[in-house]
Image (tube, grey):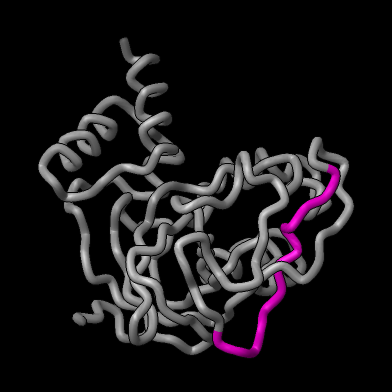
């Protein structure tokens, strides 16, 4: 493995602490993620012992894990005037030294000795997240900031724990990142993603195919 940033690591691994009542359609939420001390197994649908209450919009093989960068969390801590500890945003992995929002769609990371994950799509903030944070206009603010974090698919199963090194092992080369797609998705980026898939550089997740179709529909 070639580690492009030797300092990149997992600061915390978080899974659901308890389901909490929520005013949304499901009635409960699993957004309350808390750091765990032990190493956890990671399979195709995510961390051992983790759950998603709203499986229509969260979880599944293309959203098995959610990663958020400590650097972005510290930016938010300064903006909000309050701590943003690991798990507050509902993330499974809090990372350090890794450009999560700058990751290309389809980029792959090796975490620890065996786990390999692939960046699939940006996180879209929802009303549950708004209620979790209790901040005015939180969805709008989070969206406008563009620091949304990345959903991950599991390519090779393994285990994960705090302190694991993270290395970028593949970049598709199309240049479309989590941040650039979330903040400014356009026909050029859509074409670049489709061309990369046709060239065999990646396989787009369903969520990205749907998003690409919407972008191309607007441009037609």
Q: Is residue 87 left or right of residue 214?
A: right
172 in relation to 215, above or below: below
* Magenta stretch, main secondary structure class: loop
Image quarter of the N terminus: bottom left
Asked whether, in this view, residue 27 is left or right of residue 125, the answer is: right
Q: Residue at x 57, y 42 (%)?
A: 124
Of residues 39 and 87, the one nearer the viewer is 39
Task: Decide which of 175, 92 is in the foreground and name it.
Answer: 92
Q: Quadrant of residue 7?
A: bottom left
Q: Where is residue 26 drawn, in percent x and y? A: 79, 41
Residue 211 falls within the magenta-colored stretch:
no
Residue at 34% x, 81% y is 114
Q: Residue at x 17, y 52 (%)?
A: 173
Percent from the top left, x then y, of residue 171? 21, 59
For the record, the magenta segment spans 27-39
Residue projecting furthest to the left: 199
Report x, y in % for residue 65. 51, 62
**Taking 58 as reference, is 37 above or below it?**
below
**Residue 196 on image: x %, y %:** 17, 42
Q: Report how many numbered discs are placed on residues in the image.
A: 0
Residue 25 sits in quarter: top right
Which residue: 33% across, 64% down?
A: 155
* Picture quarter with the C terminus: top left
């Amino acid at each position: 493995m070639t580690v492009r940033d030797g300092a990149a690591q997992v600061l915390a691994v978080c899974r659901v602490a308890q389901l909490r009542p929520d005013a949304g359609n499901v009635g409960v939420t699993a957004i309350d993620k808390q750091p765990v001390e032990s190493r956890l197994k990671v399979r195709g649908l995510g961390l051992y012992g983790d759950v998603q209450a709203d499986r229509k919009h969260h979880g599944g093989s293309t959203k098995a894990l959610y990663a958020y960068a400590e650097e972005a969390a510290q930016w938010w801590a300064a903006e909000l005037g309050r701590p943003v500890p690991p798990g507050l945003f509902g993330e499974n992995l809090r990372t350090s030294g890794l450009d999560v929002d700058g990751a290309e769609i389809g980029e792959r990371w090796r975490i620890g000795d065996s786990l390999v994950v692939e960046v699939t799509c940006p996180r879209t903030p929802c009303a549950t997240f708004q209620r979790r944070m209790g901040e005015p206009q939180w969805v709008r603010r989070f969206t406008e900031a563009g620091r949304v974090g990345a959903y991950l698919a599991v390519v090779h199963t393994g285990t994960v724990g705090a302190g694991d090194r993270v290395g970028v092992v593949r970049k598709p080369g199309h240049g479309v990142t989590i941040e650039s797609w979330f903040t400014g998705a356009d026909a050029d980026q859509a074409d670049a993603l489709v061309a990369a898939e046709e060239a065999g550089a990646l396989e787009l997740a369903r969520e990205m195919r749907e998003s690409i179709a919407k972008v191309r529909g607007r441009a037609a």
